[in-house]
Each structure stands twice: as structure tokens, then as C-alpha cells.
Amino acid sequence: MQRRNLLKWLSAALSTMCASIIAVPGVRYLFATVQRDTPQAVPPQRVARLNDLPIGEPVEAAITGRRRDAWSIYPEETVGRVWLVRREADESAGSGARVDCYSSVCPHLRCNVSLDPSKQSFICPCHRGRFGLEGERLQTDGQRNPANRGLDALPCQIVEVNGEPWVEVTWQEFEPGISAKVTMS
């Protein structure tokens, strides 16, 4: 082998090695944004004392938890909001208080639903979609409701903590713009 060919071969090998040293981390950096974690089960979160919820009047509560974007993890941040509606206790059935929980995210385009000033319904500020206090879609004022489904109900339960009843909610997010209630992964 001639010295010139040996130097060409060594130069090519060294160039390839340098390029791969730079390229491999660069490619991993670019693909890190599209990698998704496997969804983890979200534990129920205590959001409000039952005694602080007036019967029949919606109360908004924040859900806090861990949020992750492409490169950072935020351990304690507001990840969503819910509307809690306390219902009257059914004394004839012997059951205690009941609380319904609805996501504050509009199922149409994921805008935050707010309480109408009359406190008789929820309204989406983006497209004026209306929802009743039971979470159902409403057709009012001659306008078509653009949402394909009612507000998304979330699992909630009443638990005793140090002798005081609290409302616990299991947070979930759902696919927008479709009529079926499908959990986002």
C-alpha cells in the first residue's frame, strides 16, 4: 500500500468518525421532540372540600400535576381545570351528597369553557357553544352549537380526610372535534 493511499484512507476514516460524533447527538436531539412517554395512570387528586361547594352552583377547581414538554419537566403545574357541581343528597336512597365533575375544556376546539353570567349554563368563548349544568349540549338563541358532544364528565368521588369530606377527581384529556369521547394518549 502506498503512503498516499494510506493517508487518504486514514483521513476518510477520521472524517467519518468526526461526522458521526456530531451527527448522532444531533439526530437524537431532533427526534426527542417526537418521542412520547407511555401514558401513566394519573392518581385521583383532592380538589375541593365538599362543604365549600354550594348545592347546584358550579365551582371551578384547578388540577395540578407533572407536565412535560419536549425537553423540560415541570413537577407541579396547573395541567387543567374542572367544573364541580354539587347535587342535592338523595335522602330516600340513603346516599350522601353527589358531585358531578366536568372538564373545563370545550370538546369542539379545546377552548376553556366558562360559566355564563346567569349561572344557568356553561359557554365556550371561541364559538359560543353552550352546555347545561348537566354537561349536555344546548341549542339556544337560534345558533347551532359547534361542539359534537357535551362536556366531558370526569370520574370523581367523595373521600373522608381527617373526618372532613373532600372531592377527588381523576384528570383525563379527550380528543377534540369528534362525537365519541376518546382519551388522548
Image: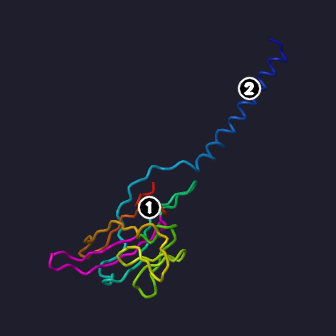
Circle 1 residues within 10 Å: few <14, some 14–19, many ≥20: some
In the rendered image, the quadrant that contains the N terminus is top right
Check residue 86 for magenta coloring.
yes
* Left or right of 2 in this view: 65: left
Circle 2 residues within 10 Å: few <14, some 14–19, many ≥20: few
* Residue 17 position in % (x across, y down): 70, 31
Indicate the quadrant where residue 90 lies. bottom left
- For label 2, the SS is helix
In front of the other: 3 or 136? 136
Could you tell me the amino acid type at mark 1? Phe
Furthest toward the front, the residue is 142
* Magenta residue span: 76-102
Q: Residue at x 49, y 71 (%)?
A: 146
Q: Is residue 14 above or below residue 72?
A: above
* Residue 86 position in % (x across, y down): 31, 79
Residue picked out by circle 2: 13
Q: Is residue 1 above or below residue 51?
A: above
Residue picked out by circle 1: 174
Q: Residue at x 40, y 61 (%)?
A: 181
Give the mark, 1 or 2, whose residue is nearer the N terminus: 2
**Prevailing secondary structure of the magenta residues:** strand
In front of the other: 176 or 68? 176
Furthest toward the right, the residue is 4
Check residue 55 for magenta coloring.
no
